[in-house]
Image (cartoon, rainbow, N blue to C red):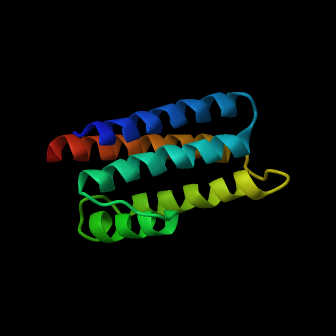
Amino acid sequence: MTPECEALLTAADDKLRAAELLRDSGLNGDAASRAYYAAFHAISALHLAAGNTFSSHAQLIGRFNKDYVRTGIFVPSLTRILTRLFEDRQLGDYEPISTVTSEQAQQDIADAHEIIKAVRTHISQST
């Protein structure tokens, strides 16, 4: 694994820990945002390991679906999870009054953990 990929996966782990701390503090919208960015950094590492980088979140998610889900490398539920994490991040970051519940924040954290684990496994098996 390249140092750049490892740095992105470390950032993913850091964002996940931040999400847990924010959730524990009752800051559910911020926790959802950090959970999304944990998954975002993991997916970025996956793309980087394949030699790809993207300038937008939509491109990153779209290519994940095209290159990894439609080809059967990852299960389709991960695209749905990633899309929901993105939507919850939007709520957490841009809604003046956060509508993200503690249950949503907890689910987002669990789902981001699942994505990070799947990406780490794939990258370690590919190198």
Does 22 sit above or below residue 59?
Answer: above
**Residue 52 versus residue 101 in the image, above or below:** below
58 or 117: which is nearer to us? 58
Quarter of the rendering containing residue 10: top left
Q: Residue furthest right?
A: 97
| Residue 5 visible at all | yes
Q: In the rendered view of the protein, which quadrant contains the N terminus?
A: top left
Q: Quadrant of residue 125?
A: top left
Q: Is residue 16 above or below residue 86?
A: above
Q: Is residue 102 left or right of residue 42?
A: right
Tell me if I can see residue 102 in this picture: no
**Residue shown at the point (71%, 52%) measured from the top left:** 93
Residue 24 percent across, percent down from the top left: 69, 28
Q: Residue at the spot x=74%, y=37% of the render?
A: 27
Disc tally is: 0
User: Residue 5 location, x and y as percent?
Assistant: 31, 42
Quarter of the image with the C terminus in it: top left
Q: Quadrant of residue 113?
A: top left
Residue 45: x and y, percent?
34, 48
Q: Is residue 23 left or right of residue 76?
A: right
Q: Residue at x 52, y 35 (%)?
A: 16
Q: Position of residue 35 (x, y in %)?
A: 56, 44
